[in-house]
Image (tube, rainbow, N blue to C red):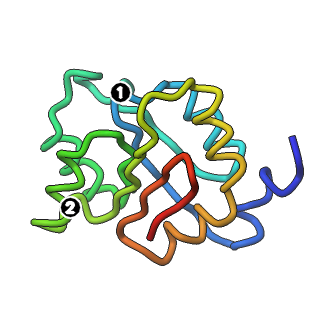
Amino acid sequence: MPANLRNTAILLNCRMDVIIDAQLPFKLCEILKQIGINPIHVQELPNGDETSDKEIIMYADKHNLIVITKDSDFYHSHMALGKPAKLLLISTGNIKNKQLFNLFRDNSLFLFNALLKNNFVELTTDGIIL
């Protein structure tokens, strides 16, 4: 793996914690760790993938986590209510997990920076939308 991926957090001298929603693969945790992001997956919560969106939002906001999801319900809640406080919406449609992981790897520095400065970031197959 290129050093720039491992050192993203070090270069930016900060810590970033996220929670990954149930419809995204657990392996995404490994990819995020490689680029300096500290992930937990909804499967790791007491109710696992049965955890409601409301519970995920409450947990994320309580622990200052960025929610990473494909679920547009989180987008609507974020835009209308400001909850969750920080959101990364994955709008790639149906792509292979390998393509998803490569999107994170290829855009790691810009994505990390965007999440530091913005409450809402969208990742598409074409890149990042702020």
Can you give x and y, in whole percent of width and height, for residue 107 in the image? 66, 56
Which residue in the structure is indicated by mark 1? 23
Which residue in the structure is indicated by mark 2? 78
Q: Residue at x 23, y 42 (%)?
A: 56
Packing grade of label 2 (10 A; few <14, some 14-19, many >=20) is: some
Can you give x and y, in whole percent of width and height, for residue 94 in the image? 44, 28
Q: Residue at x 56, y 24 (%)?
A: 96
Q: Which numbered disc flags the more N-terminal residue, 2 or 1? A: 1
As helix, strand or loop, the secondary structure at mark 2 comes to: helix
How far, Cα to Cα, is label 2 from label 1?
18 Å
| Cβ–Cβ under 8 Å for marks 2 and 1 | no
The amino acid marked with disc number 1 is Gln
Query: Relative to residue 33, is residue 87 drawn left or right?
Result: left
Residue 130 occupies quadrant: bottom left
Identify the residue at the far front of this view.
126
Q: Quadrant of the N terminus?
A: top right
As helix, strand or loop, the secondary structure at mark 1 comes to: loop
Classify 15 as above or below 96: below
Classify 104 as above or below 77: above
